Image (cartoon, rainbow, N blue to C red):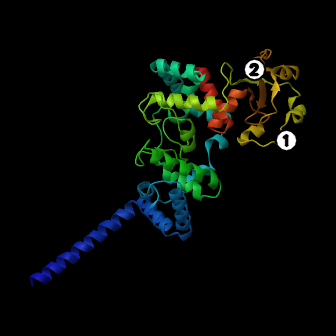
Amino acid sequence: MLKALRAVAVSQYLIFLSLVAAVYLNTNPQAHAQEHAQAQEQADPAFQQWLQTLIAEARELGIPQSIIDQALVSVTPIPQVVSNDRNQAEFVETLDEYLQKRVTDWRIQTGRERMIQHRDVLAEVAAEYGVPARFIVAIWGIETNYGNFTGGTDVVRALVTLAYDPRRADYFRRELLSALQILQDGHISHADMKGSWAGAMGQSQFMPSSFVNYAVDHDGDGRRNIWTSEADVFASIANYLSQRGWQPGQRWGREVRLPDDYHERADQWSQGDASFSCSVLRRHTVQRSLGEWQMAGVRTADGADLPQADFPGSIVLPDGEDGSAFMTYPNFRAILTYNCANNYALAVAKLADSY
């Protein structure tokens, strides 16, 4: 009799648990969908085959099994990451829309405050690398709101997603392997390696390869810490720009006024089918001396003559013939290497000019 009662009790308890689970899934469709998507990916033979090939490559590069177990063995793609990759704001918003959201009163005022707060270390870094403090702080502000938002996505999982997606698979596979190298070198743990949906990390939002090549241990603690050390963040941004072509003492460029017949003559300044590592440079004209642009009728935005200088400039119209025109100098191209989008580089430049 007692055994029968216990059997009934156990049966009722199991029914209760199943009802609780059903209610939870019905009231949490997002959690259910995520679990279902992960289960599908784990069961996807094509992804699993790709993952095993990746794991074999990581082993060949000397990545320890402990890191492979932590970061790769049970990893699944993030579907939203692919959607984000197809709809980046730098390319779908007009320049005015982009600037209104990023060069805000809050960012301008906060940047001025941070310039004062970190005056000494910024002066050290600017002197060492030849990059003005205002550009370092502007990139910091645009990328992460001065370190307030560095992203909460698992960097390895984001890079796995983008490396599996065919659009830029080779590039993101290299970035993924660089991320594993960073874990191997002990700069950050896998649990703390959080960043953007695209795999950019820390307050400087470096891609893993940029971290490997340009991150700096400015505070001398033995770690290149772009996550919590402002000194390392500032020096890393400055080192990046310096190594990617920044010219000390030069401006980034300026807004300009074009002659009335500029568009009728524009073909003579077109770059045609020229190829660039940063694709948006195809939308710029050829580079010419400022004296040649002056002779062509180009003037500053207020109608004054262009400055006399011995460096080249190119013209870009981010929103086409009816939008604003900018004369961009070599330092603009250095900013473009940080993020290959004209709107992004103009936001950094405009924010830096506002401090």
Q: What amino acid type should be assigned to the residue bearing mark 2?
A: Ala
Q: How many marks?
A: 2
Residue topped by disc 1: 272
Report the front residue among 241 and 266.
241
Residue 51 lies, in percent from the top left, at 53, 63
Q: Quadrant of residue 261?
A: top right
Does residue 315 appear left or right of residue 119 in this picture?
Answer: right
Q: Quadrant of residue 337?
A: top right
Report the front residue among 30 and 306.
306
Using the image, determine if residue 198 lies above or below residue 17. above
Q: Earlier in the sequence, mark 1 or mark 2?
A: 1
Report the front residue among 241 and 297.
241
Provide the secondary structure element on which disc 2 rests.
loop
Look at the image and tell me whether residue 299 can be seen: yes
Residue 317 is labelled as: none
Q: For the residue carrying disc 2, how many other residues have a C-alpha within 10 Å: few (<14), some (14-19), or many (20+)?
A: some
Report if the CB atoms under discs 1 and 2 are less than 8 Å apart.
no
Q: What amino acid type should be assigned to the residue bearing mark 1?
A: Gly
Provide the secondary structure element on which disc 1 rests.
loop
Query: What residue lies at 54% left-to-right and 44% top-to-bottom?
Result: 208
Residue topped by disc 2: 301
Tell which tag, 1 or 2, sits nearer the viewer: 1
Does residue 257 appear left or right of residue 12 in this picture?
Answer: right
Q: CA distance from mark 1 to mark 2?
A: 27 Å
Query: What residue lies at 86% left-to-right and 22% top-to-bottom?
Result: 292
Query: What residue lies at 34% left-to-right and 65% top-to-bottom?
Result: 23
Residue 315 lies, in percent from the top left, at 78, 30
Look at the image and tell me whether residue 152 can be seen: no
